[in-house]
Amino acid sequence: GAGVSQSPRYKVAKRGQDVALRCDPISGHVSLFWYQQALGQGPEFLTYFQNEAQLDKSGLPSDRFFAERPEGSVSTLKIQRTQQEDSAVYLCASSWMGANVLTFGAGSRLTVL
Amino acid sequence: AQKITQTQPGMFVQEKEAVTLDCTYDTSDPSYGLFWYKQPSSGEMIFLIYQGSYDQQNATEGRYSLNFQKARKSANLVISASQLGDSAMYFCAMRERISGGYQKVTFGTGTKLQVIP
């Protein structure tokens, strides 16, 4: 596709439910980042993939968060047993290897009730 | 320690005037890059400008320029001739190579710019 596609755009979950957020990066983009953005804050790094390899998951807040990119293209961020503090916009960004620009998706807004 | 520091939570500027948004950074990687992104109320992240650490000249893109002062570790964004559509959040970000062997991109907390008619 022409851009980075994220789905769903909006997700409302009850506390304790599991959610899965999808990111479809630009074709051929090797690097893929996930960020969490709370209201009024800057994007906080969650995890990074280079092709299918998850090179850095140091930003994942707890073991309830899990990300994968099994074939080096589409990535899924999964949050188990959601909590209210997980409410945020989850941003996915991709780029060529070593590129000087990250292209962002529109984000997935998660609200946990 | 913060990698990227934006000390101005909010700024006002009169339409058609210039404004400078501050950004300081900290890294031990000699080959790093600095970005500015704009995020309007709609939420999308829009790339504005990039400066590499070895670039000799300050980057410019239309009405945007990056005032890069390497010794002071600052990378301020200058917007000339402000327009109402410039009202948005602005984020400074840095790309640096870390011990994991890849180039991590870290963002600041942002500055909310409001352009006054």
Image (cartoon, coloured by chain):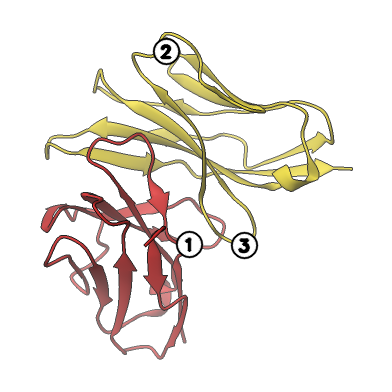
Chain colours: A red, B yellow
Q: Which chain letter goes with mark 2?
A: B
Q: Which chain letter goes with mark 3?
A: B
SS for dot 2? loop
The type of residue carrying mark 1 is Ala
Q: Which chain letter goes with mark 1?
A: A
Q: Distance between the residues labelled 1 and 3?
A: 15 Å
Residue B35 shown left or right of residue B8 in the figure: left
Q: Position of residue A60 (x, y in %)?
A: 24, 61
**What residue lies at 27% left-to-right and 63% top-to-bottom?**
A61
SS for dot 3? loop
Q: Distance between the residues labelled 1 and 2?
A: 31 Å
The tag on residue B42 is 3
The type of residue carrying mark 2 is Lys
Residue indicated by mark 1: A38
Q: How many marks?
A: 3
Residue B82 against residue A8 in the figure, above or below: above
**What residue lies at 45% left-to-right and 33% top-to-bottom?**
B35
Q: Position of residue A4 (x, y in %)?
A: 38, 60
Residue indicated by mark 2: B70
Q: Position of residue B15 (x, y in %)?
A: 84, 36
